[in-house]
């Protein structure tokens, strides 16, 4: 079973092309025009074991919002399409990831229902070239478009870069577990998800 897909999105604000492979080796080729976002998506990719290629032309002359949001939309939709009816996957995943003084916890349920609960505890307005609020928005959009319950909590930390990176790493680790191939059954007492 091949779990890879071409990604594309074209709006008046952002054009995205790329590929996503859930059964990759953690290889990232990402060019969003936003260095900090590239770094965070690279961390998510490496720790999820997904292969992700993204080529993005966004209206970053306006600000970073549309680029960050649309990257989450295409990744989330790609995951959703590849998981289909969710049969044969572990469905649940959880992980902790530290980065020096920072510690993040992520719990995910690839249930077919999007529900974000995000608490990054960021203090600064921006981190590199990305508004802190848009990092929270990334996770919300990923959860909604990926149709997954996604709980991301930064439990402690002093450095916003470290807190963000720990959150992206933990998300990758949790997703790796949740999308792991298990058997042909749907993990639900209802025998259906969504």
Image (cartoon, helix red, strand yellow):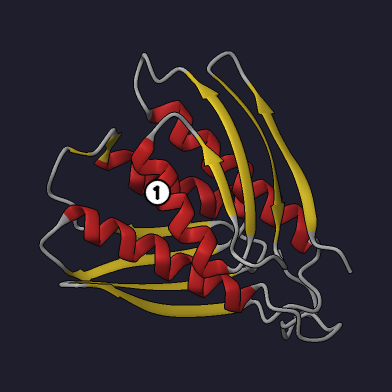
Any part of residue 124 in sight: yes
Q: Residue at x 75, y 79 (%)?
A: 181
Does residue 97 lie above or below 64 as drawn? below
Q: Position of residue 176 (x, y in %)?
A: 59, 73
Any part of residue 120 in sight: no
Q: Position of residue 110 (x, y in %)?
A: 62, 68
Q: Position of residue 173 (x, y in %)?
A: 49, 73
Q: Dot 1: what SS? A: helix
Q: Position of residue 185 (x, y in %)?
A: 83, 84
Q: Residues within 10 Å of mark 1 (few under 14, many from 20)?
A: some
Does residue 14 lie above or below 184 as drawn? above
Find residue 1 and report its image quarter: bottom right
For the image, the number of numbered tags is 1
Q: In terms of depth relative to the viewer, which is nearer, 186 or 127?
A: 127
Q: Residue at x 69, y 65 (%)?
A: 24
Residue located beneath label 1 in the image: 39
Q: Residue at x 71, y 33 (%)?
A: 8
Does residue 155 lie above or below 3 as drawn? below
Q: Is residue 186 left or right of 18 when viewed as pictured? A: right
Q: Is residue 102 left or right of 37 when viewed as pictured? A: left
The C terminus lies in which quarter of the figure?
bottom right
Find residue 187 and report its image quarter: bottom right
Q: In terms of depth relative to the viewer, which is nearer, 194 or 186?
A: 186
């Amino acid at each position: 079973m091949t779990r890879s897909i071409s990604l594309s999105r074209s709006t008046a604000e952002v054009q995205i092309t790329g590929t996503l492979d859930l059964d990759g080796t953690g290889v990232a080729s990402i060019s969003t025009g936003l260095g900090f976002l590239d770094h965070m998506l690279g961390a998510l990719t490496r720790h999820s074991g997904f292969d992700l290629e993204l080529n993005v032309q966004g209206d970053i002359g306006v600000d970073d919002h549309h680029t960050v949001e649309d990257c989450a939309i295409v990744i989330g939709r790609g995951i959703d399409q590849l998981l289909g009816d969710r049969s044969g996957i572990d469905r649940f995943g959880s992980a902790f990831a530290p980065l020096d003084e920072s510690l993040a916890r992520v719990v995910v349920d690839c249930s077919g229902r999007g529900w974000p609960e995000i608490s990054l505890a960021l203090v600064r307005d921006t981190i590199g070239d990305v508004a802190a609020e848009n990092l929270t928005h990334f996770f919300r959009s990923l959860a909604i478009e990926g149709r997954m319950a996604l709980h991301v909590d930064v439990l402690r930390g002093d450095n916003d870069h470290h807190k963000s990176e720990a959150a992206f790493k933990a998300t990758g680790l949790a997703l790796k577990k949740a999308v792991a191939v298990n058997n042909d059954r749907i993990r639900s007492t209802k025998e259906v998800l969504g």
